[in-house]
Image (spheres, helix red, strand yellow):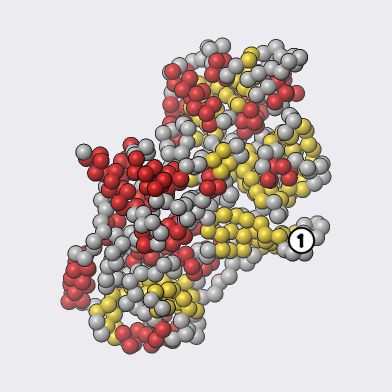
Amino acid sequence: MKNPLLPIKAVITGIKRETEDTKTYSLSIEDSLYTARPGQFNMVGYPGVGEAPVSLSSTVSEGNFQHTIRSVGRVTEFIDRFNKGDVMYVRGPYGSCWPLNSAVGNDILLVAGGVGLAPLRPVIQEILRRRDSFGMVTLICGSRSPDNILFTSEIDGWRKDIAVFLTVDEVPDGMNWQYDVGLVTQLLNKTTFKPEETFSFICGPEIMMLFVARGLFIREFLPSRVYLSLERRMECGIAQCGHCQHGSKFVCRDGPVFLYKDVSRLPDGLL
Amino acid sequence: MTGENVFQGSNLLVPKDSFFTFIDSLRSQYRVLGPVKERNHAVFREITSSVDLFMDYRTTMLSPGKMFIYRPREDILKFRMELPISIEEVEPVSEKQVIVGIHPCDINAIRYLDRTFLGSYVDTFYKTRRENTILIGLNCTQVSGNCFCSSVGSGPFLKAQSGYDMLLTDFGENYLVELKSKEAHELFLVGGKEAGPDEWSLKSEKEESLLKSFKKTICVDGLDNLFMKNLDHPVWATTANERCLSCSNCVMVCPTCFCYDLKDEVSMDLKEIKRIRQLDACQDFRFSEVHGGNFRVRRASRLRQWVIHNLNYTGQYDTIKTVGCGRCITWCPTNIDLTEMAKEIQRSTIR
């Protein structure tokens, strides 16, 4: 009987700096049967430091995948010091995924805030891989400032296949910026949707997801097609330690991807 | 015994002396645990003789399930830090044990913990201990002031037909012994009179008379919706701000509270790191903390989380979490009573 809390080694095969505090780590594990669906997460950690839940920021191929990690806590600050060739310890994947298969044949709207773009990147990769399976695909992405945007080297490539709208809260003096300034919700006006045929996947700060979802419902998007990814404290990832309980749900097992309507109006949440 | 399989076993009227001789005979194969009187309290601990047993106990501070099956602290794995770092699995300990004299609330609490630790993911430590433990239940003969098991269907007589091994009912000189598992059937080779209609009607009478002595009751029908409509009810803030100390006593003594904290402990020579888990409590400030915020900053929201989790959230495991043992009320230093909080909301809604 296998201990579900047992991590495995993941060798860092590459590190790419995304922003001042965020890097994308390419990892390789020995388990070639490891698969994960877009939206799922691993518990990532190191002995003596602990573990933190991190969504996969790429699809998985023969034991290779990526995590995009912002250095903000005990575990992530420790990982920030890692170099290529170092090892971190991961277990997973855990949780629910973005319902891409249900969205086949429909339009897709992706709304990301800050590092919330990371869990949506495997969705984009998957869409690009089988672009013909989906209708119109739009990405709306908001960040604090132009130098806080993730995956900048890839976004122009994405534009060939999907519509991308970028916005920032503010542009520091002297910085070049050709896109929007303001909230992501304002960008909902910039494009036209077919609300009843569109699946929406939202990931970002909870307050942002609240207003984006409201904006979508005002535009008559269907509650049965608006999904988001929740953040909660997680220690086990396997619906036992209890920290991520939200209403009667375990965010680690029943989420992190939920239908908006299934997690709205619960205690101790903003939605 | 674990699981949902109902075992059709025999039911015997057995003299208490014979039963206790049976318990003593188990000690050659099992660690035997049961209620023992220590000063003015009853506690569950290992016994060296059935003479130690205090079967007329009312209640204990800690439930046997959260002492001997789900341990308050457990080593999960070890890292050997000499390069290359190696991971050493901690083998689940599988000492065979018998726990005798468990009240219905605590049997039901163990059946509840099964849903967490033998559910969508199986905890190897819990499973190993659970499978190596014989549970002998004991129907209650008295009701304490804070007991409300009769309101939530978990006592004072055990209705569940599976998930434990034997059930005792006190018949004066005898125990009515109901065998509920194959293991119990193989183990209990004690002669006795097969229980007939007289015994069953006497058992019902005993239960009926006991049901009349409950002082604390709560109607849980409709609480699910009522709580959700009253997330801002003043009872949460008032109770939390004026009385709750966030001490987490309620969580620690709760037989169904399952939350744990994962922690790494580094040895003094830095060569070994143990990943352990230990009980955690939603009343603790950092329980719901994430980077940049905390989902339950206010004491009121932490208290509300605990009360609603216990009395509602039947959607989690299709059963109510509380087993009505009343320990949280008994051990709260400021006498916070979750049933009273629920009733206050019920009263104000009727008005």
Q: Determine whether A21 is above or below B243 in the image.
A: above
Image quadrant in which the N terminus of chain A is located: bottom right
* Residue drawn where x is 31% and y is 62% of the image: B146
Q: How many marks?
A: 1
- In this picture, is A116 found above or below B208? above
**Residue at coordinates 27% horizontally, 53% vertically from top-left?**
B218
- Which of B341/A125 is in front? B341
**Residue that badge 1 annotates:** B270
Circle 1 marks a residue in which chain?
B
- Which residue is painted at 62% across and 67% down in the image? B91
Residue A29, position as x, y percentages in the image: 73, 46
Which residue is at 39% across, 48% downward? B242
Evaluate whether residue B343 shows in this view.
Answer: yes
Mark 1: which amino acid? Answer: Leu
Res B166 → quadrant: bottom left
Residue B79: x percent and y percent?
72, 59
10 Å neighbourhood of mark 1: few (<14), some, or many (≥20)?
A: few
- B74 or A175, nearer to the observer: A175
Indicate the secondary structure of the residue bearing disc 1: loop
